Image (tube, rainbow, N blue to C red):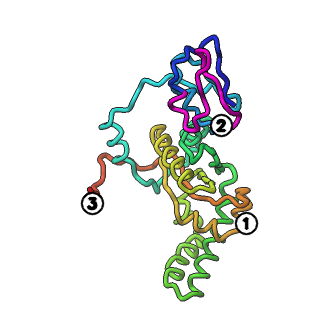
Amino acid sequence: MIHIDPSACIGCGLCVRDCPQKNLTVENGCCAVKREVCLGCGHCVAICPQRAVSQDDSDMTTVEPVGFLVPPEDFLLQVKSRRSIRRFTEQKIAREVAEQILEAGRFTETAKNTQGVRYVFLQNELAAFKALVWEGWRAWCEAKEAAGDPDGRRYMVYYRRYERDPADDRLFFNAPAALAVLSKHPVDGGLAAANIENMAVAMGLGVLFDGYVVEAIRQSPAAQAFLNAGDTPVVAVLLLGYPAVSYTSTAPRRPVNVEWK
């Protein structure tokens, strides 16, 4: 629910004009809430020049003044310089570092402000989870082989190599941690995961979006139960760790595929 501090509100109407649900009005020179039904998007909080608006179901201590923008050339260089990391050191990720990168996910936009993205950070129990995922991978390969799909035999090689030598890990690449992103809305989870990756890189971590692990989880009810997934799909898995490799330049790409109309 939105609350207006009448001693601070100046009745400027900025929040009224910006409210997506048209749920605010100005009465007697002060903003007022029309209905208890609210999207909770926080636009009114963010636009108020007097800090007169608050939400009782949100952490208001996270509200900060806005004024700094990343220069566009710096942001583009950050995007161009990111690499999918498959070589990690053994260094663990501190809890406070993990919490900070998750903040980038928490403040990512979601459809209708549902904020329905959930995360499972796997580090202390990663080995147990990996065993379940590898069994899911084996089941996936066997199903493909039974269906006559040549990918089944080709990808089963990964399992056989891992079975002989757990260090030969073509699913987790011996990353010290992994982050499972769960959401009933894949776009919400994907956007959050992308922001988390950018934040992780900014903090010196390396990241790999691992679609193979996501597929293996889909084939493993035990892995889904480990994540307490229920009926919420795992939309992304990020392997995380400090990179054991350094890149000195960006990589080339093909021309952008766009139609101008």
Q: How many residues crowd mark 2 within 10 Å: few (<14), some (14–19), many (20+)?
A: some
Give the left or right position of residue 62, taking residue 209 as reference.
right
User: How far is disc 1 from disc 2 in space, using C-alphas?
Assistant: 38 Å
Q: CA distance from mark 3 to mark 1?
A: 41 Å
Q: What residue is at 33 percent from the left and 48 percent from the top?
A: 80
Q: Is residue 82 visible?
A: yes
Q: Is residue 44 left or right of residue 66?
A: right
Q: Which residues are magenta?
A: 16-38
**Residue indicated by mark 1:** 222
1 or 2: mark nearer the eye: 2
Residue drawn at (36%, 39%), measured in percent from left and top?
75
Residue 252: x and y, percent? 27, 55
Residue 34 or 124: which is nearer the viewer? 34
Hey, what amino acid is under mark 3?
Arg
User: Residue 36 magenta-drawn?
Assistant: yes
Of the numbered discs 1 and 2, the one sitting upstream in the chain is 2
CB contact under 8 Å: marks 3 and 1:
no
Amino acid type, callout 1: Ala
Q: Nearer the viewer, mark 3 or mark 2?
A: 2
Is 100 in front, or is 128?
A: 100
- Count the labels in the image: 3
| Quarter assignment of residue 226 | bottom right
Disc 3 is placed on an element classified as: loop
Query: Does 14 sit above or below residue 191?
Result: above
x 54%, y 66%: residue: 212
Which of disc 2 and disc 3 is earlier in sequence? 2
Name the mark on residue 38: 2
